[in-house]
Image: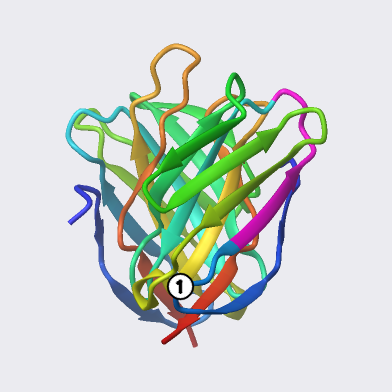
Amino acid sequence: DSGVTQTPKHLITATGQRVTLRCSPRSGDLSVYWYQQSLDQGLQFLIQYYNGEERAKGNILERFSAQQFPDLHSELNLSSLELGDSALYFCASSQPITDINYGYTFGSGTRLTVV
Amino acid sequence: GENVEQHPSTLSVQEGDSAVIKCTYSDSASNYFPWYKQELGKGPQLIIDIRSNVGEKKDQRIAVTLNKTAKHFSLHITETQPEDSAVYFCAANSNSGYALNFGKGTSLLVTP
């Protein structure tokens, strides 16, 4: 157990639907990162939150949004789902201190299948 | 994000041999380079990292080297064991500071 909790583990939904993925970071970590992993694109950075504020944005589609709540858990919302959105979605957390990076701790992911 | 290129995409070695995975990055401001191991059905796990102020770091059978001038870094696994079989990802931090850009992964197979 890495300490980063992602729910649900699996999700099957139809095209056009909306889903919410949830992530609880490791205790003490203030940053949450969302990544999408597909076979042909590898790990693609979507978005980062730090202590409730959006910190950095990657290749996140306009149909996707995220937020981090006061208790530091985060949710990734995916709407108007398309077949191509089928992928593994990972959450990771870290506690960056000043300008020094520390390695992420990843959760076990949510496998999203859009049918 | 900035590009991180990783080679090879697949690597098969015999138990006891060494394995080397190479990555290049494009952002000269990158200063943090972690490596992750992902086993089937699990999330990536940090195995070693290196910062730009050092050229080499070793932890038991794994080592990482960094050449900032050439913008490349490598993972070396010695005395490979079947349990080393997994997908390995290199990464570099981006110009936004904390987000990591990942290579596309190397599937390592260690055969007994």
Front one among B18 and A67: B18
Q: Is residue A11 magenta?
A: no
Instruction: Tell whether A1 sits left or right of A58.
Output: left
Magenta segment's dominant SS is strand
Q: Is residue B54 above or below residue B83?
A: above
Question: What x and y, as percent, mark residue B12?
Answer: 58, 80
Question: What x and y, as percent, mark residue B98?
Answer: 52, 29
Task: Check disc 1 and report its element: helix, strand or loop.
Answer: loop
Residue at 46%, 53% (x, y): give it: B36
Image quarter where the N terminus of chain A lies is bottom left
Question: What x and y, as percent, mark residue A60?
Answer: 61, 50
Under mark 1, the amino acid is: Gly
Q: What chain does badge 1 belong to?
A: B
Residue at 60%, 75% (x, y): give it: A39
Q: Which residue is mark 1?
A: B16
In the image, the segment drawn in magenta is B20-29
Residue at 67%, 71% (x, y): give it: B9
Instruction: Tell whether B99 sits left or right of B62.
Output: right
Question: What x and y, as percent, mark residue A30?
Answer: 31, 27
